[in-house]
Image: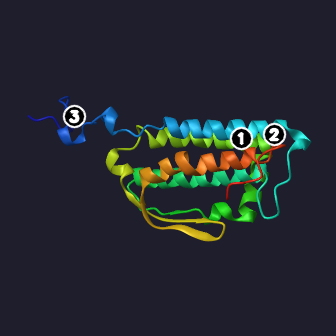
Amino acid sequence: MRSSRRRRGTCSRGPPPSSLRARPQKEEDMMDTTPLSDAYGALLDAAVTVAGSGDAVAAPPAGEWNADQILAHVSLVTAATIAAASCVAAGANTTYDNRIALDAWTIDRVIALAGGDAGLRDRVRRQGEALCALGGPALSEAELATPVPTRLLSNGKVLVDQPVPLGDLVTGLAEVELPGHTKQLLALLPNAPADRPAA
């Protein structure tokens, strides 16, 4: 006579199907985030130098940013890049638009939330570390090649208004955005050259 007890389900102890097995990326397919990390390091070093100069720091010309505003802008841009990368990693659609990072009210709010220059530097440092971790081995070559509808403005002018590969957005930070704002910070120092990079 058969037992009235139901048999518990059992899991196969064999290897998972090949389609479900993790395929480690080849090292050559991973994005090298060393330049990005170095760019954040240079920016933060410049911010520390400016903060250490105290009252000797020059006031920016009318319409340009002070050190806290520069760091808050970088924080917003970094957060937007992390958000775009996370959406791609999650298989979701995303866009990239830097207009909110140029908004004066939003910049002032980030400064208040961070609690001033030291908090801003820590915020940017931690966001940079997160982006480097996400943009490197965590994303495949195909994900980095994903086109992201992008709109980038500077000084009220449209610089980019078209899809840009996610990887190019990340490298653009390392090669253009962060070095530009590093120079902008250093231009606030006493006896700095008169020419200032655009925001």
Q: Which one is earlier in the sequence, the residue at label 1 or at label 2?
A: 2
Could you tell me which residue is drawn at 59 percent across and 51 percent down? 177
- Which amino acid is tagged 2? Ala
Type of colouring: rainbow
- Which amino acid is tagged 3? Thr
Could you tell me which residue is drawn at 35 percent across and 44 percent down? 140
Relative side of 97 to 182, left or right: left
Q: Give the mark toward the camera: 3 or 1.
A: 1
Query: In the rendered image, which quarter contains the N terminus?
Result: top left
Q: Which residue is mark 3?
A: 10
| Label 3, label 1: how far apart the Cα atoms are | 53 Å
Could you tell me which residue is drawn at 68 percent across and 43 percent down? 123
Q: Is residue 157 above or below residue 147?
A: below
- Which amino acid is tagged 1? Arg
Q: Position of residue 135 (x, y in %)?
A: 46, 43
Q: Quadrant of residue 15?
A: top left
Q: Which residue is mark 2?
A: 51
- Helix, strand or loop at label 2? It is helix
Q: Bin the neighbour count of mark 1 within 10 Å (Cα to Cα): few under 14, some 14-19, many 20 and up.
A: many
Residue at the extreme right of the image, as rendered: 55
Query: In the rendered image, which quarter contains the C terminus?
Result: bottom right
| Label 2, label 3: how far apart the Cα atoms are | 63 Å
| Circles 3 and 1 in contact, beta carbons < 8 Å | no
Q: Quadrant of residue 128?
A: top right
Q: Which residue is mark 1?
A: 121
- Helix, strand or loop at label 1? It is helix
